[in-house]
Image (spheres, rainbow, N blue to C red):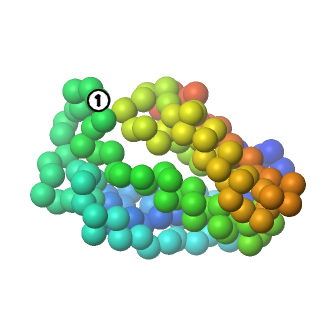
């Protein structure tokens, strides 16, 4: 979607100790198909903290969630992802960061809400050389209001 909007795409994926590598493998495949300029896979050890059924093998992954913040929420995952993307964006002198968060099929993840993205963008433009110099960075969330079915079709 970013490439279709005319952006030069540098892609970050994260191996954060998640149980399943399906999304990471899919990202590698999509990047190859689209001819992205550069793709980096960053290894993070979020499983060292635990606290999520996605990274802690002692917590069962439920068949379905029952409300509230689910056990599959990985503490601060998107904050960490965006922070690393922000650092690389600043090195690349990029004006935009795209992230695939989604709020339509809201699962209770606090870091997938528009309020979180807005707050992070404000912080990013206060806390970086890019932001202070006036160029700034914009965070795009093209999947935010799409259903899962729409995302797959896209």
Q: Residue at x 27, y 38 (%)?
A: 70
Instruction: Estimate the x, y position of residue 146 in percent, counting from the top left.
Output: 56, 29
Q: Residue at x 38, y 57 (%)?
A: 22
Q: Is residue 153 visible to us here?
A: no
Can you identify the residue that label 1 sits on?
Answer: 68
The front one of 153 and 129 is 129
- Residue sitting at x 49%, y 59%: 80
Above-or-below relation of 35 to 54: below
Position of residue 96 measured from the top left corner of the image (x, y, whole percent) = 75, 52
Q: Is residue 108 above or below residue 5?
A: above
Q: Is 52 positioned to the left or the right of 34 in the image?
A: left
Q: Quadrant of residue 18?
A: bottom left
Foreground: 86 or 98?
Answer: 86
Q: Nearer the viewer, residue 63 or 43?
A: 43
User: Residue 142: x, y in percent?
Assistant: 65, 38
Q: Quadrant of residue 37?
A: bottom right
Q: Residue at x 65, y 67 (%)?
A: 87
Q: Quadrant of the N terminus?
A: top right
Q: Is residue 55 visible?
A: yes
The image quadrant of residue 47 is bottom left
Which residue lies most toward the right here?
134
Circle 1 crowding by C-alpha within 10 Å: few under 14, some 14–19, many from 20: few
Quarter of the rendering occupied by the C terminus: top right
């Amino acid at each position: 979607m970013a490439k279709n909007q005319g952006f030069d795409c540098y892609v970050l994926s994260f191996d954060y100790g998640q149980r399943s590598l399906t999304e990471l493998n899919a990202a590698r495949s999509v990047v190859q198909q689209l001819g992205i300029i550069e793709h980096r896979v960053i290894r993070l050890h979020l499983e060292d903290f635990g606290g999520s059924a996605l990274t802690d093998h002692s917590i069962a992954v439920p068949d379905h969630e029952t409300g509230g913040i689910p056990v599959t929420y990985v503490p601060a995952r998107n904050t960490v992802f965006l922070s690393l993307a922000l650092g690389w964006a600043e090195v690349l002198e990029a004006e935009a960061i795209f992230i695939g968060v989604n709020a339509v099929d809201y699962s209770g993840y606090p870091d997938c809400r528009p309020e979180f993205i807005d707050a992070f963008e404000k912080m990013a433009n206060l806390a970086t050389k890019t932001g202070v110099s006036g160029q700034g960075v914009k965070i795009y969330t093209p999947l935010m209001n799409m259903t899962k079915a729409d995302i797959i079709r896209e």
